Image (tube, grey):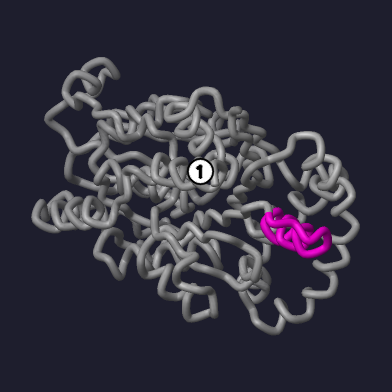
Amino acid sequence: MASRIILMYISEVSGHHSATIAIEKAIKTLSPHTEILNINAFNYTNPISEKIVNSLYMGLIKNTPRIWDYLYDNPVVVKKVKKIKENIHRMNSPKLKLLFDKFKPDVVACTQAFPCGMVADFKKTYNSDMPLVAVLTDYIPHSYWIYDNIDYYITPSEEVAARLAKKGVDSFKIKPLGIPFNPKFTQPVIKEQSLEKLGLDPGLVTILIMGGGQGLGPIKTIVKTLKKVKLDFQEIVITGTNKKLYRSLKKKIKKYKKKMLLYGYTDNINELMGVSDIIITKPGGVTTAEALAKGLAMVVVKPIPGQEANNTAYLMQQGAAIKAASATKINLVIEELLGNPHKLKGLHESAMRIAKPNASFDIARLLLDAAAN
């Protein structure tokens, strides 16, 4: 009989969703007959609340990031919202029971703390021994993940595993397998061939500029500031679902002296990362994992307080990224890298050292084992 696995995330255009898709693809490769339900847990349990919460979150991030910084993994806040969370989870438990009774999962894996806590409290309420796996997609093990009845924690790195153990999680539960990303990112790209196909010069350094699936961050300012760089390079800009940004850059593209390729939401990021030497980006967990697997030198601009700020700190500590002081000074960082091949090579080597290119398959194997036992 085929195993049944439920994967849970929140928000459609997000790293959490990209991570569950990556795990699903890896499971289907290893075990094609496994039944998988990949579900937006927040939309399933609270479809109206999901829209409101997503809107509030995006508003906080864009307009008042300091408030998000205060709320993120703040022990005082964690303690105050504990009762509220428990009440919400109790309200959601009947819906989850319907789902679990119908699908009968052998294991549940969550790539975001909200559904993970919801399932953990469900297990407690109904005295369930269903295996539950937490898959962390950022380099910080915040307190909203901590529940006694989570069976395994998948962490992005050994450092995060150690920090999670310090928070009281039993070390045998922690598996530093990495952040899951689409397995196609491990497929080699023939750089010269792809550059020529894209109409780019194989003799120039290629800089990739992106801001996650939603095209967030000061991309327009970055592109404008890069015009000051005197050394030669070419750039690829991805605006994701940000149509306003795409239209704005499209109008100006002919005025740029540097060669530029402009994309909206695209599914060939594997190839675009494969032909690039430097990536300027927001350090979301999945984007970071993909870039590390490709050995890209990372330049971080304006990380979101909380998860992205912690991702940045980890990458800088490991020598795999440089943080620009601001978008208006990005030209100074790029000039330094273009003029110092040794430094560029160092970033590349550090990225390769800490990359976990097999994360999706390693996580898939763990879930299949948990489902079988």
Decide if residue 232 is in sight here. yes
Question: Horizontal and vertical percent for residue 180?
Answer: 45, 45
State yes or no: residue 119 in magenta: yes
Residue 12 or residue 146, whichever sits in front: 146
Name the kind of residue labelled 1 in the image. Gly
Our reading of the magenta stretch's main secondary structure is helix
Residue drawn at the location 26% of the way across and 15% of the way down: 197
Q: Quadrant of residue 41?
A: top right
- Work out whether 223 lies above or below 157: above
Q: Secondary structure at mark 1?
A: loop
Residue drawn at the location 64% of the way across and 79% of the way down: 74
Q: Quadrant of residue 114?
A: bottom right
In this rendering, position of residue 26 left or right of residue 349: right
Residue 185 or residue 323, whichever sits in front: 185
Question: Horizontal and vertical percent for residue 95?
Answer: 87, 46
Question: Horizontal and vertical percent for residue 137?
Answer: 50, 54
Residue 200 or residue 309, whichever sits in front: 309
Mark 1 surroundings within 10 Å by alpha-carbon count, few (fewer than 14), some (14 through 19), many (20 or more): many
- Work out whether 146 lies above or below 244: below
Residue 289 or residue 178, whichever sits in front: 178
Q: Which residues are magenta?
A: 115-129
Please state, as top left, top right, bottom left or bottom right, where the N terminus lies in the image: top right
Query: Which residue is identified by label 1?
Result: 212
In this rendering, position of residue 51 left or right of residue 231: right
State yes or no: residue 203 in magenta: no
- Work out whether 234 lies above or below 127: above
In this rendering, position of residue 299 left or right of residue 204: right
Question: Horizontal and vertical percent for residue 196?
Answer: 21, 18
Decide if residue 224 is in sight here. no
In this rendering, position of residue 244 left or right of residue 281: right
